[in-house]
Amino acid sequence: MTKKARAAEAVARLATRYPDAICSLDYSSRNAFQLLVATRLSAQCTDARVNLVTPALFARFPDAAALAAATPEEVETYIRSCGLYKTKARDLVAMAGQLMERHGGEVPNTIEALTALSGVGRKTANLVCGDIFDMPGAVVADTHCIRITNRLGLCNTKDPRKVEDQLRALLPPDESNDFCHRLVLFGRDVCDARKPRCEACPLADICPSKTT
């Protein structure tokens, strides 16, 4: 089976198993600012923890203008439990200021403009472009994506940018973003980092890393 055929089969089977391909971060529908902030907070932190702190954070700072007017110290009080909170608070205030100065307070819709913002990497930019702006070919190369696509033999590197490029060459553009969301669900449900449940895996027969 070629990589492209294996990728297509994985896309189809995970779509059947997880029909609702949604982001595990909580944010108001189509609210690019909230998703941008929540994704920055998720670095080295669980999505569940982020979801606990963002309701109060968004109530206090509902948009870029409010966040840009804050001090990092005030933001810290809302996100302290997320880890690396001092760096994240500085980045969030700086990012909001850049949104005001460069984009009129709106979140831009390109990878290039997003990654020019403080604290925003390609993973975050791809997530925002895919979930909010429906950009074809968005690939969110997070830890689940990198681990599972390497196990499936779709990728041969742990470098996020290279994984992104390799998957973009294999996945249907209109399926790539949803596929990445499904990989998160699949990684938590079946393809665990330490002990994958190969005996219960819907991809076992096409996975070169299957254990007996």
Image (cartoon, grey):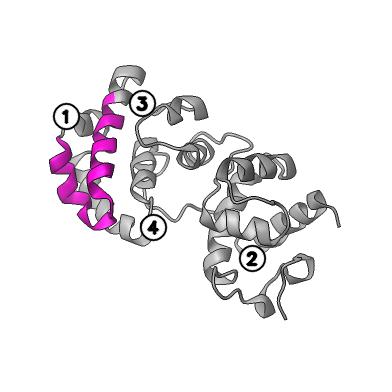
Which residue is nearer to you in this view: 121 or 110? 121
For the N terminus, give its image quadrant. Answer: bottom right
Q: Which residue is mark 4?
A: 47
Residue 97 visible at all: yes
Density class for disc 4 (Cα within 10 Å; few <14, some 14-19, many ≥20) is some
Residue identified by numbered label 2: 17
Q: Which residue is mark 3?
A: 106
Does dot 3 land on a helix, a strand or a loop?
Answer: loop
Taking depth in this image into account, of 135 and 196 the one nearest to the observer is 196
Residue 181 coordinates in the image, percent (x, y): 55, 53
Q: Earlier in the sequence, mark 1 or mark 3?
A: 1
Instruction: Determine which residue is flagged by label 1.
Output: 69
Give amino acid for label 4.
Asp
Residue 167 location, quadrant = top right
Placement of 46 over or under 135, stated as above or below: below
Q: CA distance from mark 2 to mark 3?
A: 36 Å
Residue 133 location in percent, x, y? 51, 33
Dot 1 falls on a residue whose secondary structure is loop
Q: Secondary structure under badge 4?
A: helix
Magenta range is 71-97
Q: Is residue 68 magenta?
A: no
Q: Is residue 122 above or below residue 98?
A: below
Q: Position of residue 169 (x, y in %)?
A: 73, 40
Alpha carbon distance from label 1 to label 4: 26 Å
Instruction: Give the Cα separation between the discs numbered 1 and 3.
Output: 15 Å
The circle on residue 36 is none
- Number of residues whose C-alpha sits closer than 10 Å to that of mark 3, classed few (under 14), some (14–19) or many (20 or more): some
Q: Of the residues under marks 2 and 3, which one precedes in the sequence?
A: 2
Residue 73 belongs to the span the image colors magenta = yes
- The amino acid marked with disc number 1 is Ala
Majority secondary structure of magenta residues:
helix
How far apart are the two marked residues, 2 and 1, measured between alpha carbons? 44 Å
